Image: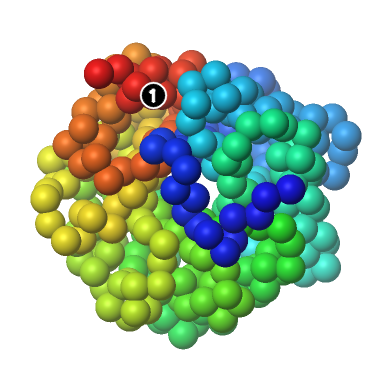
Amino acid sequence: MTIYRDSFPPSSVDLFLAYVGMETDLIFNQGVDLPGFASYPLLKTTEGQELLKGYMKDLIALGKETSAGVILESPTWVANRDRGAALGYGFDELKKLNQDAIAMMAAVRLESDHAPIVISANIGPREDAYAPSAQMTPEEAERYHAEQIAVLAETDVDVISGYTLAYPTEAIGMVRAARQFGVPVVISFTVETNGRLPTGESLDEAISGVDTATAGYAAYFMINCAHPEHFSGVLEDASWMQRVRGIIANASRCSHADLDEADELDDGNPSELGVQLSELRRRFPHIKVLGGCCGTDMRHMKQIVTASHTP
């Protein structure tokens, strides 16, 4: 089994696929109840494990079909202390579930003859990604996220990926915690319809601030949980943009507030989303990771990779 921790990101392919739209697909399309938007409790049953493996195997199959690399994201986005406690989980059970998630992913990778397959430990914010009630200092964020990262660092994980972050100081803490344990880390910010973080910072300010405070330790940055039309206008040919290597987009043009209130899934237009992401990649050829977030499924992923491979 190849572990990429010491050589992340792998340079053997030009495009990697990542998918984090599983929770919305499970809730809205398959009728699976996920309290607190948490998918890690599915690890506790054989049926739940098969659901999780199905998404991973589908993504690997698409990667193999299209000669794209695959980044498997673990179902541990909200498997941290505070958000776990809200669902009745203590530290010991969270530790086991975090590590079980990576063990399951390693087994799925071992069964496949496709490469490269990267195992990403997906971690999320301490509070609501769209509207945090308070902002931690970098020191507070480092102490908080070090607990989950320490658990994950003991596994076969290749990289820690902090997804859907709303403010820079939490990202600084995540990066510092990952550095404590010698694990590569990727930081993905979310933005509102104006292209700015929920707490008001520009992407330039957020990315530059994190790099300055962490000596550029993050492997790269991404944007996720937003539609391309929300942020494409603020992307520019600048030094901070060279640090953005991935876009994991929402299917819907709706704002975060509207998505929170939605009773039905807005799956947008898969082919249009594929074209929009491919156009961004043509503008910025250094972008190597593309994928789908809320409202997306394998239809969107297929369109994303197909459009990206079209001359």
- Residue 194 vertical position relative to residue 154 in the rendered view, above or below: above
Q: Is residue 236 left or right of residue 92?
A: left
Q: Residue at x 45, y 39 (%)?
A: 13
Q: Is residue 96 visible?
A: yes
Q: Residue furthest bottom?
A: 139
Q: Residue furthest front?
A: 12
Residue in front for this viewpoint, 302 or 50: 302
Q: Is residue 247 left or right of residue 265?
A: left
Q: Quadrant of residue 52?
A: top right
Q: Quadrant of residue 275?
A: top left
Q: Position of residue 206 (x, y in %)?
A: 27, 65
Q: Is residue 270 left or right of residue 143?
A: left
| SS at badge 1 | helix
Q: Residue at x 60, y 37 (%)?
A: 115
Residue in front for this viewpoint, 223 or 91: 223
Which residue is identified by label 1?
304
